Amino acid sequence: MARAAKRPGCRTAVFLVAVLLLALLAASFTAWRGITAPFLVGGDTKDVVEVEIRPGSTAAGIAATLHRRDVLADPFWFRALVSARGAAGDLKAGTYRFRGRMSAADVLEVVIAGPPPADLRVTIPEGLTVRETIGRLVGKGLGTEDGFEKALLESMPLVHRFDPQSDDGEGYLFPDTYRFAEQSSERHVLRTMIYRFLEAAARAMGTSPGGGDTGLDLRQIVTLASLVEKETALDDERGLVAGVFANRLRRGMLLQCDPTVIYAIERSGRPVKRLLRADLEFDSPWNTYRHAGLPPGPICCPGAASLRAASRPAETRYLFFVADGEGGHDFSRTIGEHNRAVARYRAWQRRNRP
């Protein structure tokens, strides 16, 4: 009796099933590797990377932040694992410290467990220079001046990723409230502040650092923000001050910003208790009474509000401003208006002279 011939369709089906099984095995292996493969946090076994996860952050946002900070090799697998475990509601806000080799699964367990208790709280106000910031950190017991000077040099390659022209990190130690363990190294403290700057700058500019609406690059925006920071402490004035400087830059006018003169003189080693008219002639590229355009770099470390103002200056016709004696400023369109505002301020000074 003749055997029945096998149907070609049956062999094709077996082949397709085998291919599908192999594809599933390959995908499973890829997923397993992506989730469990260890990644060297920060690129160095000595690195401790501190990351703040803000309340309300999504799994995608957390993954992106961890990837940007060199904690995750690929944010996709973190998001995929959160989804597979249904753990989106278990992710906890707070400040985390990561170190060593960690897989995406390890990182997720840390974020589910919650942040460790912090030991030391330090607030760095807006408008301090790098040297003043280091002095504040030393005063809080977070290290020594020599240790921070060495750490600053070691941190410059990180700064050079986004500002190759910086030689001292000025402008990039972000003013904020931090929590550090008492045993935190000076290098860890400074790198945390630099990373916090990058995150704040990205939020302030509405894009990656270097964006914004001014046509300026990141260094120029931070420089403009540092001038705004030194000129006014009022949030509702920052945009106007930035707008005045932007208008003067477009017209090729000298910025004539007093804080740049103070910064120039103090860079030379001479403290300034009170700015004198003769000081306006001090010969330095930082002196915006003598040199057109922005100074060569930031004159302090600006906060988020000043970064926003410098990224998007107010549209205004003002070209001048002067203190009004009440903590704010009078803004003027013409030199005549400005001269009258100056006269009012000088009269206020005479009335309130001790």
Image: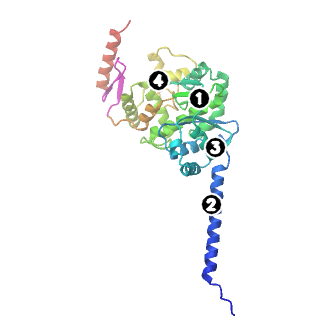
Residue 71 sits in which quadrant?
top right
Task: Kindly identify the amino acid type of the residue bearing the numbered disc 3.
Answer: Asp
Q: Are marks 1 and 4 in contact (CB under 8 Å)?
A: no
Of mark 1 and mark 4, the one earlier in the sequence is 1
Task: Kindly identify the amino acid type of the residue bearing the numbered disc 1.
Answer: Pro
Q: CA distance from mark 2 to mark 1?
A: 39 Å
Q: Is residue 296 above or below residue 103?
A: above
* Badge number at residue 134: none
Identify the residue position indicated by label 4 in the image: 259
Of mark 3 and mark 4, the one earlier in the sequence is 3
Q: Are marks 3 and 2 in contact (CB under 8 Å)?
A: no
Q: Dot 4 lies on which element?
A: helix
Identify the residue position indicated by label 2 in the image: 27
Q: Quadrant of the C terminus?
A: top left
Q: Nearer the viewer, residue 249 or 32?
A: 32
Identify the residue position indicated by label 3 in the image: 106
Looking at the image, what colour scheme do you see? Answer: rainbow
x and y, in percent, of residue 117 in the image: 59, 29
Q: Dot 3 lies on which element?
A: helix
- Residue drawn at point x = 29 percent, y = 20 percent: 340
x and y, in percent, of residue 204 in the image: 45, 37
The magenta stretch spans residue 330: yes
Which residue range is magenta in the image?
317-334
The magenta stretch spans residue 238: no
Q: CA distance from mark 4 to mark 2?
A: 60 Å
Task: Kindly identify the amino acid type of the residue bearing the numbered disc 4.
Answer: Pro
Q: Nearer the viewer, residue 137 or 181?
A: 181
Please state which of the two labelled residues, at mark 3 or mark 4, is closer to the viewer: 3
Instruction: Determine crowd level at label 1: few under 14, some 14-19, many 20+ residues with C-alpha closer than 10 A.
Output: few
Identify the residue position indicated by label 1 in the image: 117
Q: CA distance from mark 3 to mark 4?
A: 48 Å
Q: CA distance from mark 3 to mark 2?
A: 21 Å
